[in-house]
Amino acid sequence: MLEKAFRLEEVERIPWVPFVGVHGGNLIGVDAEAFQRSSKHIVDGIDKAIELYKPDGIPVAFDLQIEAEILGCKLAWSKENPPAVISHPLNEGVELSSLKLPTENDGRIPLVLEATRELRKKHPELALYGLITGPFTLALHLLGTDIFMKLFEDPDYVNELMEFCAQVGIKHAELLLDAGCDVIAVVDPMTSQIDPMSFETFVSPSVTKIFDFVRSKKKYSSFFVCGHAQQNIEVMCDCKPDNISIDENIPLDFVKETALAKGISFGGNMKLTSVLLLGNEMDSRKEAVNCLDLGGKKGFILAPGCDLPMDTPVANLQAVTELVYDDYAQQVAREMEHTSSLQPLSLDGHFEEGKVVVDIITLDSASCAPCQYMVEAVKQASIDFGDKVIVNEHKIKDVEGIQMMMALGVQNVPTTCINGNVEFISQIPRKTEIEKAIKKAMN
Amino acid sequence: MSIPLHLITGFLGSGKTSFLDHFLKKTDTKENIAIIQNEFSPVNIDGRKFYEDSNFQVLEINNGSVFCVCLLGSFIQSLNEFVKKYKPDLLLMEASGLSDPIGVGQIFQSSQLKGKVYLEHVWCLVDAFNFNRIPALKVRMEHQLRSADTIILNKTDLLKGSTDDLLTKIKTINPFAKVVEGLYGQVDINDYKKALNLFPEDQASALGRPDIGSVVIRSTRSIAPENLTQFLNQLKADCLRCKGFVKLKTGKSAFVQGVLDSVTIHEVENFSGAGDLVLIGNFEDEKNLQLMFDEYCKDEH
């Protein structure tokens, strides 16, 4: 599926790649530092993510400090985040000419390679993303913020540094590909700081070499940026990656238009903080369906805007997963799109003394198979109770249906509520289960 | 009671730390002010000592030199614990020079911080001498300026000639912010704070301050002018103040500013990038205003 998207072929289902980094640690109950220092933890965490989120592709390690650490940058470790670079060797007297390219034995590269090999064995069909630090971000790690002044004070030095960072990237990419990665993602968030002309002068030559190298190995590449980088999308495409991945700061339709015109696939850009981290399941579904509808079935990969925060609720990402695989869930999310201005329906007079009221929230039982079975099952189970049970179907294709859904606090469709309490969600219950629930409500 | 947060932004070397020092020294000493700063920011040693001597609490954030919105998640918890422990009256946050300043405002919508902390004011420092020296960074500088409520022109003493040209450029980028000149970031803080106060002092003591929160809506989408009006009307009952830029379907952009039920919308030119709209008020928990705004951006709404 993912390969089809990279090749700009029409797909039946849009592929999905959750960027699980330290969030994998959360899934197996270890902190970010322990997670990123152990190949076993990485394998276990990513395994868990694969089980929960059924992705088409997944990064092995989302950590932009691996190369910097090897090259002498000091790191500050954190329990909730990837480590941070806190010293810049080229700004502290170290000569650029003294820096050596990393090898398979340096720093944390061995543990990432080991995790890659292990995950390759366990999941032969899944696309593994090998992440490398983009040359500009690595140069900033090595030199610190002085790099911005040097862009115009000493462009030759910056070019020399960028060339070195590109060579580091190529070496790292080679090791990751040999260990079994299918896609190399060049992650260069700091390029969002600069304008297209500086990008072309300093970033394009070095980053193009990395993409050429990946192509020569007959593998795919992706260019990740985050932040306000809209100005650079066109020059990024000109570096000839196979894919561009962006966050919520850039309109998806703009990237789609620009990338497809240049024959490049694209991905993104579910909102990380305001929706996936802080929103609920319904918010996440709405956001995902919005992205799916904008992205379309040609050349688009659904992904969050950036590395998922450690504490992103699992339920939100599972809601996205469900939506990716289920056309009905997509329809429901679309129906729910215009709900923000609606108020829940009043339930005054809805319930009757001495009777059990069963409310089934559906997309529409006439057109949605799971809804149809749910309604039939409930009606069947209610027959024997005669007029003691009232069964109502509320279709969310109608505004009132949505307002009822809100009033009952229902998040999924189809859902059956008995006397206002959510009883059965999505899965069709057995007749005996429904009867049991009705009897319980009678007493 | 909700705690206002002032964000101090500005590019590297623009004088954010000097301004922070000035703010602390000149402000009413009865206030319990706390500071949020990057642990590894090159703060002068004197500054740190001054905080310690004056009993200002400091929350250090560990993001190294590369600050990314992806790292905001863990900040929610540390800020929550910090405000619970020290109960400050005011939070001053010095943003990293490379950060996306207003992005941090998104975390105040989290259930842990809702009603506790809100974004009250954004100060942006500008290095008058170096303003145009790094064209590569123009986009980032413009974004910082546009997010500001007050822009402080610093290092004007190094500038040969007048500041007129610079002021015109800044006014083109953000015609609505107050622009003041202040050597080493020295401006009259108390005057500004008075002007900002949402609740007149007598009212505040009589009624107590309600729990208020702030929401940052960031959108790359454009909205039809009539839908924008509808969206703002919808929030009227809950929103005390709103301010920011949004993109319009007409191809132009709008600067939105308002207090309670009088909101003005000005069309502006020369706008690029995503729009940010900051809302301060008492909002219903269950509504995700970001998604609500996205809905209003659709034609068929």
Image (tube, rainbow, N blue to C red):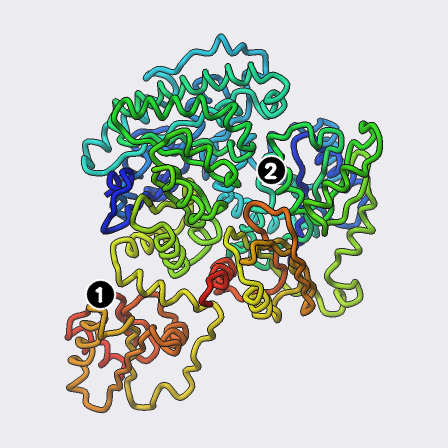
**Relative vertical location of residue A124 with respect to residue A384 in this rendering, above or below:** above
Answer few, some or many: residues within 10 Å of disc 1's Cα (few below 14, many 20 plus, some between 14 and 19).
some
Tell which residue pokes out farthest to the top in this image: A98
CA distance separating discs 1 and 2: 49 Å
Q: Nearer the viewer, residue A337 or A67?
A: A337
Q: Is residue A22 visible?
A: no
The residue that label 1 is drawn on is A427
Quarter of the figure with residue B247: bottom right
What residue type is disc 2 on? Arg
Which residue shows up at 20% across the image and 73% down it? A372
Kindly identify the residue that appears in the image at 23 percent across and 69 percent down. A368
Crowd rating for badge 2 (residues with CA inside 10 Å; few <14, some 14–19, many 20+):
many
- Tell me the tag on residue B140: 2
Residue B180 placement (x, y as % from top left): 80, 43
What amino acid does circle 1 point to?
Gln
Dot 1 falls on a residue whose secondary structure is loop
Please give left or right for residue B154 compared with residue A120 in the image.
right
> Toward which corner of the image does residue A42 lie, by quadrant?
top left
Percent across and percent down for residue B124 are: 70, 42
Report in which chain the residue with disc 1 lies. Answer: A
Determine whether the residue tagged by mark 2 lies in a helix, strand or loop.
helix
Find residue A163 and report its horizontal and vertical position in percent.
Answer: 46, 17
